[in-house]
Image: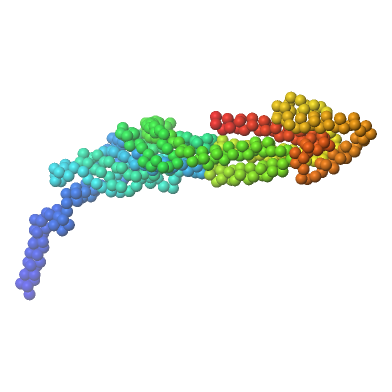
């Protein structure tokens, strides 16, 4: 029994000695390569990243990590209701990671390595004036290019949504100036030395041409700010100032052409016959058209805009003008179609028959009135016993007809009094035409200045 126990312990010890010897003789990397068919890239990533801490800045605490930043702009859009600018771009960041250096000859001459953005340390460069406060992840999840000297290049596709103080005064022919302010959120300038990439302007282009906005100019600036609380810690941020202009050929056809038609319709209204009821119809159609445009502007332009667009002010002014024109047309029609028994006041008639009436284009009516007076005087000399009240009575009867037009009134010898009131109504129309022309010219000059 004792011999059996001794033999059992000898076999047990021999077995574990055999395992220990085999484990020490066989290299770990040989077993790894034999099992996984590992490449030089696998070995390099294992050696570099096995104990790598991506949350620790890859430099001594007394050294600064210099980060070069550049940007290529591909697309720009503006969200007026959010007072924001949306920028689609490619960002290029370059820095040196002291913990990612290797000797290429030890890894088969491998001098460059690709690693996921979640595997290595990255500078926390964010947009300071971002509108997306719930998330600061501006960059796409793309790989980083790592070189044997520790240089890391990261070129992710990026979407910036930045606040911008929009000036819509010249909408839709406006030019906006917006800024992208970028910097490190956690590190001061003593830890991350943020610098502009000297070659970034070469790639600052707009790849999409058929958009609403055109990139006119891009300026870059590096600012170093020191606060009172931390005078020994400068904070660095980069400012990209974008000057963009709205492409407005379509808006010229959509807004300016109808505006010209509205002005012409408003002015033509004063040249229609004084007794024409179509004056009211023309003014009503004009009011509807302008109101529809103003409703459309309400959907396109944010109500919190500091400066109201001049185009909207012009259309609003046109609505006021057309409304006043509607009131004037109602007064003119009432003056010209209403039967009168009292003649026009002498002083007013003297003015209208004189040179002011001729300058207003009332010569035809003036001649008709003068001829009617001449015919009336001759008729009065022939019949001395006719009472003047009968003339007013016949005048009242002849002008009560609703279907009478200007030609019928002029041809009747008993409508001198009515002609005088038509002369006054037409003079109001022509004077309003001159006043409205000046007002529209002033409105157009104020909108174009």
- In front: 411, or 341? 411
Residue 308 in view, yes or no: no
Q: What is the count of numbered marks?
A: 0
- Toward the viewer: 322 or 391? 391
Q: Quadrant of residue 326?
A: top right
Give the answer, above or below, for where 290 lies relative to 442. below
Side of 212 where 31 appears, left or right: left
Q: Residue furthest top?
A: 355
Which residue is found at the position 42% from the left and 32% from the top? 227
Quadrant in which residue 178 is drawn:
top left
Q: Is residue 135 left or right of residue 382?
A: left
In the figure, residue 17 lies in which quadrant?
Answer: bottom left
Front residue of this view, candidates 103 and 357: 357
Q: Residue at x 93, y 32 (%)?
A: 384
Residue at figure coordinates x 17%, y 51% from the top left? 39
Q: Position of residue 200 (x, y in %)?
A: 32, 35
Q: Could you tell me which residue is drawn at 75 percent across and 41 percent down?
A: 405
Dividing the image into 4 quarters, which one contains the N terminus? bottom left
Picture coordinates of residue 410, whole percent (x, y): 77, 36
Seen as rendered, the residue at the extreme front is 382
- Judged from this view, the residue extending furthest toward the bottom is 1
Nearest the camera: 319 or 121? 319
Residue 343 image point, x, y percent: 84, 33
- Above-or-below relation of 374 to 39: above
Confirm whether residue 433 shows in the render: yes
């Amino acid at each position: 029994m004792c011999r059996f126990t001794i033999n059992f312990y000898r076999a047990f010890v021999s077995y574990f000695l055999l395992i220990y010897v085999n484990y020490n003789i066989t290299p770990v990397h040989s077993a790894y390569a034999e099992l996984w068919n590992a490449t030089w890239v696998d070995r390099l990533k294992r050696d570099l990243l096995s104990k790598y801490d991506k949350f620790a800045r890859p430099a001594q605490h007394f050294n600064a990590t210099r980060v070069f930043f550049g940007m290529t702009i591909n697309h720009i859009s503006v969200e007026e209701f959010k007072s924001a600018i949306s920028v689609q771009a490619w960002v290029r960041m370059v820095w040196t990671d002291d913990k990612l250096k290797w000797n290429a000859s030890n890894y088969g001459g491998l001098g460059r390595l690709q690693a996921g953005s979640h595997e290595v340390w990255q500078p926390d460069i964010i947009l300071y004036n971002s509108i997306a406060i719930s998330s600061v992840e501006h960059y796409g999840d793309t790989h980083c290019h790592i070189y044997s000297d520790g240089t890391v290049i990261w070129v992710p596709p990026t979407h910036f949504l930045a606040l911008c103080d929009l000036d819509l005064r010249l909408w839709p022919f406006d030019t906006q100036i917006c800024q992208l302010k970028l910097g490190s959120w956690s590190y001061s300038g003593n830890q991350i030395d943020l610098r502009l990439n000297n070659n970034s302007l070469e790639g600052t282009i707009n790849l999409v041409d058929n958009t609403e906005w055109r990139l006119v100019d891009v300026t870059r600036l590096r600012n170093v700010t020191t606060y009172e609380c931390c005078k020994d810690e400068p904070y660095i941020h980069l400012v990209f100032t974008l000057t963009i202009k709205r492409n407005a050929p379509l808006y010229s056809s959509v807004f300016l052409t109808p505006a010209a038609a509205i002005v012409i319709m408003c002015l033509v209204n004063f040249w229609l016959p004084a007794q024409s009821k179509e004056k009211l119809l023309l003014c009503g159609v004009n009011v509807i058209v302008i109101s529809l445009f103003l409703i459309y502007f309400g959907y396109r332009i944010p109500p919190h805009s500091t400066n109201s667009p001049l185009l909207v002010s012009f259309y609003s002014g046109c609505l006021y003008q057309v409304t006043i024109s509607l009131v004037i047309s109602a007064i003119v029609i009432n003056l010209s179609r209403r039967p009168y028994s009292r003649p026009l006041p002498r002083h007013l008639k003297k003015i209208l028959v004189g040179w002011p009436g001729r300058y207003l284009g009332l010569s035809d009516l003036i001649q008709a009135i003068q001829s009617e007076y001449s015919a009336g005087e001759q008729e009065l000399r022939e019949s001395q016993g006719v009472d003047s009240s009968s003339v007013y009575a016949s005048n009242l009867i002849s002008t009560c007809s609703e279907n009478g037009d200007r030609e019928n009134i002029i041809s009747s010898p008993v409508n001198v009094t009515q002609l005088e009131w038509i002369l006054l109504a037409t003079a109001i129309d022509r004077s309003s035409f001159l006043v409205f022309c000046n007002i529209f010219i002033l409105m157009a000059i104020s909108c174009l200045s």
